[in-house]
Image: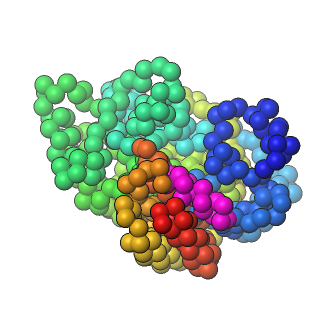
Amino acid sequence: MSVAETSVFEELESNVRGYCRSWPTIFDTASGSVLRDERGREYLDFFAGAGALNYGHNNPVLKRALIDYIARDGLTHGLDMSTVAKRELLEALRELILRPRGLDYKVQFPGPTGANAVEAALKLARKVTGRQAVLNFTNAFHGMTLGALSVTGNAAKRAGAGVPLPHATPMPYDGFLGDGDSLGWMCRMLDDASSGLDKPAAVIVETVQGEGGVNVAGVEWLRTLAQLCRSRGILLIVDDVQMGCGRTGPFFSFEIAGITPDIVTLSKAIGGYGLPMALVLMRPELDQWAPGEHNGTFRGNNPAFVTARVALEHYWSDDALERATAVKAAVMWAALERIAGECDGISVRGRGLVQGLVFADASRAAKVCRAAFDRGLLVETSGSVDEVVKLIPPLTIGEGELARGLDVLGESVAAVCG
């Protein structure tokens, strides 16, 4: 970009901006899995709004519903008032998602972000149990507000809080100890009265750690964790902000393990269209909030309720999307293994349509992302030292687009690693 093009951003926008530094162009339009900058150049999107755009940019089915709702003067801002849009969303959530899975949850609308949902979940767990401590996991990421940061692992993000982040204790995630039994160690700490670990109100976990480096928790590990919590009277919170809504295949990422968390947080793709929205799901007996005890001015984003409802009706009334995701995930895995096999020091990990190339030389990951951008593909890094090239394309990406993006990624890796 020229100096003139970037001057207003440089002059007025805070230094906190991040993605624009990795992708130095000015985007203008988008549809499906493609973004276009103001010069008309196209970029394949393997980022999907950090997982907020599971159904792609400007999805035509969702866009039509949104336009129709706005055109008839449908309520936009509703706080927590009862509205037609909210009622229809709750009915769709009950009939298409909760009942078919045998889940009995109450639904809370917190502020419309994943971090706010996490804050609400932590507050509720402490309120219900009367305990303060929460256990989180190494490499976890749960948001940038103080409570969410307290259960986040990344040192740089935690340091940004500027204050101590108490009442949370990290435990080793699946695989963090190599072949060590991380949950056995956790049990020992919980059950030994001299360990110095207070009994926690809750354990919060991501089934796949996206920001933490595409670390995947095994099915048996998740089952053991759920049993560990249940047997000790500890609430289990699953943060499905990025991995929910089909990212790993099923609607909820924990379905693969056959567990039922006490509390679930959703955001990002739950709004369908990329509009801000978040939910906290909780077992009915945990719904001990007093009216207004956790609130927010924009918790009633009714246009998001509309697109969320239509997304559920269009994509989750049967298992077609889940089956298609499994097929695309297998294609991606095979391509990534082929790419990794052609260069030393690269491995593959992931589940569903969140997968990553892991570089032994972390500096190469950022170079691959930049080489991909230069070739018209948007991918980002993740992991404790940004050692992973993370791929999270829209679930609705076409087979041809997926293959083309994977080819570009292979070219980018070859250009960096020779």
Question: Is 77 left, or right, of 236 in this rendering?
Answer: right
Q: Nearer the viewer, residue 90 or 383?
A: 383
The residue that appears at 43% across and 50% down in the rendered structure is 362
The residue that appears at 38% across and 43% down in the rendered structure is 139
| Percent coordinates x, y for residue 356 in the rendering | 45, 61
In the rendered image, the residue lying farthest to the top is 163
Q: Nearer the viewer, residue 158 or 82?
A: 158
| Percent coordinates x, y for residue 287 in the rendering | 45, 39
Q: Is residue 237 magenta?
A: no
In the rendered image, the residue lying farthest to the front is 418
Q: How many marks?
A: 0
The residue that appears at 46% across and 75% down in the rendered structure is 335
Above or below for 402 versus 180: below
Occupied quadrant, residue 274: bottom right
Question: Is 190 left, or right, of 137 in this rendering?
Answer: left
| Percent coordinates x, y for residue 265 in the rendering | 48, 46
Range of magenta residues? 365-382
Q: Nearer the viewer, residue 298 or 214?
A: 214
Above or below for 193 versus 300: above
Above or below for 254 versus 284: below
| Percent coordinates x, y for residue 1 in the rendering | 78, 50
Above or below for 320 versus 346: below
**Would you say residue 227 is visible in this rendering?**
no
The residue that appears at 33% across and 55% down in the rendered structure is 217
Q: Is residue 377 magenta?
A: yes
